[in-house]
Image: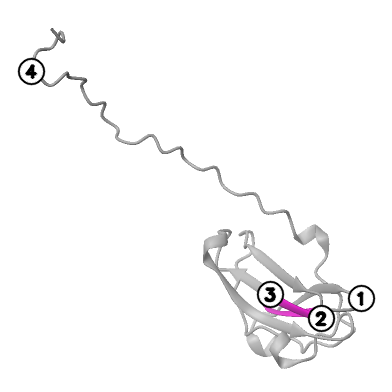
Amino acid sequence: YKFAVSSEDEGQLWLSTDSSINNKRLIATAKSQKPREYGTASSQSDPVHLQRGRAYYIETIHRETTGADSISVSAHHGQTVSQIADFTDSDLPIAGKYLSPYVAPPTKPNTGSSEEEEESDGDGSEDGE
């Protein structure tokens, strides 16, 4: 796969090696004056190997300075890198049916030590007398 981001005015595209937000890395940036401008080299990622059926975390960050605002991401794929078509400004963004909202995994509560400490008043007796 190759990805391209278009952003009016500035944008970043981040992709994880899996479904974890912790493994994301910046793969493309964009600075444009019009929507769906995918043709610039910096707005395109290097080829990325993705496996069918696996979930991947993907994120865009958008910065608007003046005027209209938009951000979109397009993707191309092929069996080999040479089969991946070049991006054009007429490419469509990734369809929503291929995306889902990020849901953070549940966190484990911090309960401290797994062994309970025995209470003592410090004199060595068990009954506290």
Q: Which residue lies under the disc numbered 2?
A: 9
Q: Badge 3 is on which residue?
A: 13
Closer-to-camera residue (79/85): 85
Q: Which mark is residue 68?
A: 1
- Residue at 77% of width from left, 85% of height from top? 31
Q: Magenta region: which residues?
A: 1-12
Residue 28 included in the magenta stretch of the image:
no
Q: Position of residue 51 (x, y in %)?
A: 60, 67
- In this rendering, would 109 be left or right of 81? left
Q: Which residue is mark 4?
A: 124
**Circle 3 or circle 2, nearest the eye:** 2
Cα separation, mark 3 vs mark 2, equals 14 Å
In this rendering, the answer to whether 108 lies above or below 125 is below
Residue at horizontal 52%, vertical 66%?
A: 23
Closest to the camera, between mark 1 and mark 3, is 1
Whole-Å distance between the Cαs marked 1 and 3? Answer: 20 Å
> Is there a contact, CB below 8 Å, between mark 4 and mark 1?
no
Label 1 environment density (alpha carbons within 10 Å; few <14, some 14–19, many ≥20): few
Left or right of 4, for residue 47: left
Indicate which disc, 2 or 4, sits on the residue closer to the N terminus. Answer: 2
Which quadrant does the N terminus fall into? bottom right
Q: Exactly how many numbered labels are in the figure?
A: 4
SS under mark 1:
loop
Q: Amino acid at mark 2?
A: Asp
Residue 127 spot, x, y in % from top left: 15, 8
